[in-house]
Image (cartoon, rainbow, N blue to C red):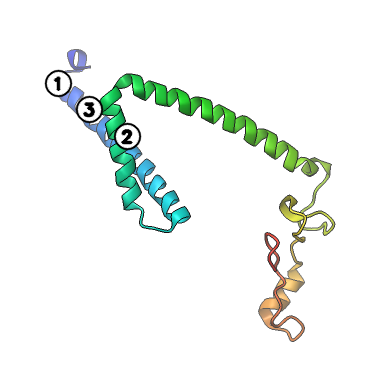
Amino acid sequence: MGWRYGPIAKTIVFLIAMFNMCIALLAEYTTIGSIFSDFVGSVSYGIIIVVGVLTLAYTAYGGLAVSIATDMVQGVASVILAVVLTIFVAVTYRWVRKGFRPYTSPSIAWYGHPKTQALPSVNEVTACFAGSPQTQGQSTVVAAGVS
């Protein structure tokens, strides 16, 4: 790049690429911290530092070969996950092709779970929020099997 457009263009492209990489790493580490925080319930910065140091260590130790090997493992894992997820969705939601109408058919479970019920009618929801004596203290909205 530098021989064709000069050192200024080379520097600008370098700075833009570095900025892009910093934003990508920030997004990845923030996501890792958020997932860890949600599952473990602790602060997220600890795991962000640990993952960052481990990534830096194995990349510095192994160089490009380790980075390529890691990308290959992630690619294979992604393909396996896609196949398993496709099979899971095909088996779990096969009844959707048979005319499933989630808002009008109380005989078919919502989201495929047998303990769930169909969504309530507009009148039931309106009565619940209006505070009519018939529905006070009752939960008419059923989602994910919890009433």
Q: Position of residue 77 (x, y in %)?
A: 52, 29
Q: In x, y percent, where is residue 29?
A: 35, 43
Q: What residue did someone put label 3 on?
A: 14
The kind of residue tagged 1 is Pro
Specify the amino acid type for callout 2.
Answer: Thr
The residue at the point 66 percent across, 34 percent down is 86
Q: Quadrant of residue 59?
A: top left
CA gap between label 3 and label 2 equals: 22 Å
| Left or right of 76, for residue 126 | right
N-terminal label among 1 and 3: 1
Which mark, residue 7?
1
Q: Point out the image quarter for the C terminus.
A: bottom right
Any part of residue 110 in sight:
yes
Report the residue at 39% width, 58% height from top: 42
Q: Position of residue 28 (x, y in %)?
A: 38, 41
Q: CA distance from mark 1 to mark 3?
A: 10 Å
Measured in 3D between alpha carbons, the distance from the residue under mark 1 to the one under mark 2, in whole angstroms, is 31 Å
Callout in the foreground (1, 3): 3
For the residues labelled 3 and 2, say whether their Cβ atoms are less than 8 Å apart. Answer: no
Q: Is residue 20 visible?
A: no
Q: Residue furthest left?
A: 7
At x 15%, y 24%, the residue is 8
Residue that protrudes farthest toward the bottom in the picture: 133
Residue 55: mark in rendering = 2
Q: Compared to 7, does 16 lie above or below?
A: below
Check the image and report above or below for 20 versus 110: above
Earlier-in-chain disc, 3 versus 2: 3
Disc 2 crowd rating (10 Å Cα; few below 14, some 14-19, many 20+) is few
* Element type where label 1 sits in the image: helix
Labels 1 & 3 near each other (Cβ < 8 A): no
**Residue 102: percent from the left, percent from the top?**
76, 54
